[in-house]
Image (cartoon, rainbow, N blue to C red):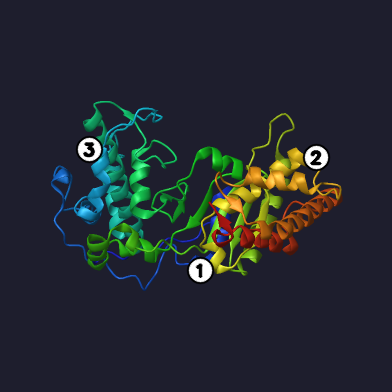
Amino acid sequence: MNSIPRQKPTASGAKSGINGIIAACNKNDRFKLLEDDSVLPGNLNNPIHPIFTRLDCRGPMQQALRLASHFLAHDTLLSFFVPLLYGREVTGVIDGTFKTYLSNPLNGTSTEKHQAYLSGYAAASHCAQFRHDFIFATTIVHEIVHAVGVVRRGNLDEPFVRADCPESEWGYSWENFMFGCIINLQDKPGLGTHLLVRRAWADADLVDEAGGKEYSDVPMSYIAQWFRNETWDIVCEQGPTAIAPPVAHFKIQSSKKFEAWVVQSDQLQMKKDLKLLYARWKEEAKELERTSSSLIPLKRRGRAKIIWKPVTTKQLQKNNDLWYHTGFLFDRLQSHCGLPGSQSVGEDDIHGSIVDALPRGIHIQRAAWPLLIYIVRMMLTCYATARAEGTEATMLTEDVVSWETEIWTICRPGNIRE
């Protein structure tokens, strides 16, 4: 296998939707989301868990199965399974229904396709193999968690693992326990394991109110460390929280409020690439409209606008809950006050809307209210002016960004109390 040249993924043409956004953000793999020459080879040599003995433990799956075995081999990680096996169901807990099974994507495929998959894996770079094996291993354990619940309860109905879980989904509950987030493959067509993105495990209604799911990048250095013995020495002693979360270089949200892709980053050079992508989208839309029959509906790309929001490195790493509630705030202001931007909007209306938009149990300190109300009023005026002039759509102004940053500063944990 070592004699086979390693293949590194190459960039393709312009993509639509979030795939195009991600490609622009990571142009020329600037954040090393696909390849990182400083990444060390994997050195896992732990025994493969007996639960996997029916799989091909000596072939290309060996590295992934060793990682999956680590996920199941340490007391600091097995603590997650204790409430699943021995926990008591509390009366009144909302139950959900989840059908679970272990699937094999090679079932029903020809011998030629099977060999093609294995050959593609062997020829892939170390980083590409790490991404493949990471997703393979976490998916196996995700499904095992569901299977443990079925054996324990005798049915497919899953209660909440903990009272503060956003949904009754045991597989995601384990992933959040292990990594503090949900890590997914980038939704991109074609063979191969493309770059990985992460999202917070949050209440679906809150996410919808905030404007939609938000995804962050996952550097290769974060993924590769899970294939090193020294990482597992730390996890064995201190648990999964001892491993720092991935450092975000950009965040992407599909905003319902703005009907646009909202991109946050501390990398200012990214703005130029996003503008070029947006220009290509407009050209493609015009060409499609010109060549399509009037009797045939145009194929919709989905979100067709891009909003650029520069933030500091520190802000980019913060939890997004209060940013979500800032977006929810303006929806509440519009319902309370009518058209935003009017100087006649009273402080009581703004105050009430802010209270409605904050998470339950969170209260802003009294001294922060005058400045917060002033900033909100200025933002409403800016939005109203932009709407009247028809200049609101593609890129947020620096003033609006700075005001939203001020709101974040006021609402940060140091200025709130439970």
Sequence-first disc among 2 and 3: 3
| Residue drawn 81% across the image and 53% down it | 381
Q: Quick one: quadrant of the N terminus?
A: bottom left
User: What residue is pinned by disc 1?
Assistant: 30
> Going by the image, does 311 lie left or right of 151?
right
The amino acid pointed to by label 2 is: Gly
For the residue carrying disc 1, how many other residues have a C-alpha within 10 Å: few (<14), some (14-19), or many (20+)? few
Q: Which residue is mark 3?
A: 85
| Element carrying mark 3 | helix
Whole-percent x and y of residue 88?
27, 33
Q: How many marks?
A: 3
Q: Horizontal placement of 273 versus 248: left or right?
A: right
Image mark for residue 338: 2
Q: Is residue 276 visible?
A: no
Residue 185 lies, in percent from the top left, at 42, 50
- Cα separation, mark 2 vs mark 3, equals 53 Å
Residue 156's place in the image compared with 392, above or below, is above
Residue 255 point in image, percent of width and height: 63, 46
Seen at 49% across and 66% down, the residue is 29
Q: Is residue 118 visible?
A: yes
The answer to whether the residues at label 3 and label 1 have Cβ atoms under 8 Å apart is no
* Image depth: mark 3 or mark 1 in front: 3
Q: Secondary structure at mark 1?
A: loop
Q: Residue furthest top?
A: 155
Looking at numbered disc 3 in the image, what kind of residue is underneath it? Leu
Q: Position of residue 198 (x, y in %)?
A: 45, 53
Q: Which label is found at residue 132?
A: none
In the figure, residue 365 lies in which quadrant?
A: bottom right
Q: Above or below — where is 84 with respect to 390?
A: above
- Which of marks 2 and 1 precedes in the sequence? 1
Q: Is residue 203 left or right of residue 133?
A: right
Disc 1 residue type? Arg
